[in-house]
Image (cartoon, rainbow, N blue to C red):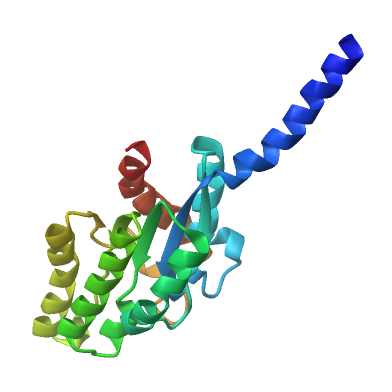
């Protein structure tokens, strides 16, 4: 009888493990090279560090990074539907716009693209963490100001959580030679910046 009971327990445990993994809620990171780990090992990027942190603190969540180097808001708008269908996330960390700004794209277009992505994510019943960016001052005060206002404006309009600036706290020596992408040493800081705003979404 004891042997039979032990076999039943082992069988239930074997079945439960994959089911629990499948039931894990997905956090989808949807960004550009700043989130894709450009110039560093993927495991050392802030999404990789976030994956490790949540495996300890929130094991009921898994992190999927669908970021692409060079991605624009238009590109993100075109592929968000497929990403939502593929991963069915509970939370989307939306970190796009930097490439648009660096290329001097029309601010109204950037806002419209991000707005459409947010609407699609919410229609899929996922929460949104919008990650803001800032531009170097050499792009002109007027353009830089208009660009930076897009993120808080969208956060207010859609009542979503906002990280005002992904690179907050990163110092000049923590950038790679291109002066655009943070080094490995800066990634823990980026991860903490994101995690601070992400945590409230995981408690709801």
Which image quarter: residue 109?
bottom left
Residue 145, position in %: x, y? 11, 76
Residue 143, position in %: x, y? 13, 84
The residue lying at 24 percent from left, 56 percent from top is 162
Which image quarter: residue 97?
bottom left
Up/down of 145 relative to 190, above or below? below
Residue 77, position in %: x, y? 34, 78
Horizontal relation, residue 135 to residue 11: left or right: left
Residue 1, position in %: x, y? 89, 9
Residue 136 seen anywhere in this rendered image of the structure: no
Which residue is most to the left?
Answer: 142
Up/down of 89 relative to 100, above or below? above
Name the one closer to the observer, 6 or 162. 6
The residue lying at 55 percent from left, 75 percent from top is 39
Name the one closer to the observer, 173 or 85. 85
The residue lying at 55 percent from left, 57 percent from top is 48
Q: How many callouts does the rendering have?
A: 0
Up/down of 47 relative to 104, above or below? above
Residue 45 seen anywhere in this rendered image of the structure: yes
The residue lying at 35 percent from left, 59 percent from top is 124
Which image quarter: residue 134?
bottom left
Which residue is most to the top?
Answer: 1
Name the one closer to the observer, 111 or 182. 111
Up/down of 91 relative to 135, above or below? above
**In the picture, which quadrant includes the C terminus?**
top left
Name the one closer to the observer, 133 or 114. 114
């Amino acid at each position: 009888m004891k042997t039979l009971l032990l076999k039943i327990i082992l069988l239930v445990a074997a079945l439960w493990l994959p089911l629990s993994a499948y039931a894990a809620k997905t956090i989808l990171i949807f960004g550009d090279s700043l989130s894709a780990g450009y110039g560093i090992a993927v495991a050392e990027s802030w999404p990789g560090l976030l994956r490790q942190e949540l495996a300890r603190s929130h094991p009921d969540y898994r992190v999927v990074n669908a970021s692409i180097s060079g991605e624009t808001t238009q590109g993100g708008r075109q592929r968000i539907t497929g990403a939502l269908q593929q991963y069915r996330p509970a939370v989307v960390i939306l970190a796009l716009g930097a490439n648009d700004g660096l290329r001097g794209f029309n601010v109204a277009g950037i806002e419209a693209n991000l707005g459409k992505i947010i609407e699609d994510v919410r229609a899929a019943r996922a929460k949104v963490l919008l990650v803001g960016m800032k531009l170097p001052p050499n792009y002109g005060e007027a353009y830089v100001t208009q660009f930076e206002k897009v993120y808080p404006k969208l956060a207010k309009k859609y009542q979503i959580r906002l990280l005002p600036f992904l690179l907050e706290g990163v110092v000049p020596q923590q950038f790679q030679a291109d002066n655009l992408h943070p080094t490995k040493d800066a990634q823990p800081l980026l991860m903490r910046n994101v995690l601070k705003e992400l945590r409230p979404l995981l408690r709801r």
